[in-house]
Image: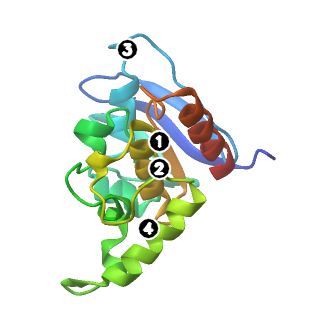
């Protein structure tokens, strides 16, 4: 992949949990952030996705300042988040897998307060085929899927809208070798 211009610039970003973080990410790059438990990896991801508040620093996307105070702000800038904890913060386990996949694009699926369930199921089925998701169908609760397939639902959710940047926080944590390889190949392909 050819490395392009600067996609994301983080300058002196600080929050209650991280201090003075700076880096550049170019289009086509994948950056890995490593550290021991408590080093701030998750906290950095949460700040960049609007889940935690920054107390200083600057974030630029494509050379323009991006104010990211909420997850909605992150979505509006095309930032998607794949969490490390699919059961607690990644999925609504008792809801249908299709609903989990299409949560970020509800506005496109509805006419004010009524969702187009047929269109939602089409999107979910199409995405499930692309990700080789093994499931009984769109109506199956996310809790009925294996860990690897639950993680694929999270990846599918992040692909349901136009994506500029994906923040993937240990996206393969607790998965089998086959699912790990598949998720990694999808992340490489998405770049």
Sort mark 4 into few (<14), some (14-19) or many (20+) by Cα contacts within 10 Å. many
Mark with earlier residue (3, 4): 3
- Which residue is identified by label 2? 155
Mark with earlier residue (1, 3): 3
Viewer-proximal residue among 183 and 54: 183
Q: Is residue 116 left or right of residue 30?
A: left
The residues tagged by marks 3 and 2 sit, at their Cα atoms, a distance apart of 25 Å
Instruction: Single out the mark in the foreground, 1 or 2.
Output: 2
Residue lying at the far right of the rendered structure: 2
Viewer-proximal residue among 80 and 22: 80
**Contact, mark 1 vs mark 3 (Cβ under 8 Å):** no
Residue 185 can be seen in this image: yes
Viewer-proximal residue among 47 and 131: 131
- Which residue is identified by label 3? 39
Sort mark 2 into few (<14), some (14-19) or many (20+) by Cα contacts within 10 Å. many
- Which residue is identified by label 4? 124
The residues tagged by marks 1 and 4 sit, at their Cα atoms, a distance apart of 22 Å
The residues tagged by marks 3 and 4 sit, at their Cα atoms, a distance apart of 36 Å
**Figure check: 26 above or below 159:** above
**Figure check: 16 above or below 97:** above
**Figure check: 50 above or below 97:** above
> Residue 81: x percent and y percent?
41, 46
- Which residue is identified by label 1? 167
Q: Secondary structure at mark 4?
A: helix
């Amino acid at each position: 992949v050819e490395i392009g211009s600067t996609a994301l610039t983080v300058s002196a970003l600080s929050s209650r949990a991280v201090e003075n973080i700076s880096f550049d990410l170019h289009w086509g790059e994948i950056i890995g952030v490593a550290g021991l438990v408590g080093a701030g990896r998750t906290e950095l991801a949460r700040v960049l996705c609007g889940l935690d508040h920054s107390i200083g620093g600057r974030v630029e996307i494509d050379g323009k300042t991006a104010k990211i105070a909420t997850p909605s702000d992150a979505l509006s800038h095309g930032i998607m988040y794949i969490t490390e904890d699919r059961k607690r913060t990644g999925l609504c386990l008792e809801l249908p897998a299709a609903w989990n996949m299409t949560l970020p694009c509800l506005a496109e699926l509805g006419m004010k307060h009524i969702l187009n369930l047929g269109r939602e199921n089409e999107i979910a089925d199409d995405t499930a085929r692309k990700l080789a998701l093994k499931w009984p169908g769109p109506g199956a609760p996310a809790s009925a899927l294996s860990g690897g397939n639950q993680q694929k639902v999270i990846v599918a959710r992040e692909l349901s809208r136009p994506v500029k940047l994906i923040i993937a926080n240990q996206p393969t944590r607790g998965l089998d070798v086959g699912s790990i390889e598949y998720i990694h190949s999808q992340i490489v392909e998405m770049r």
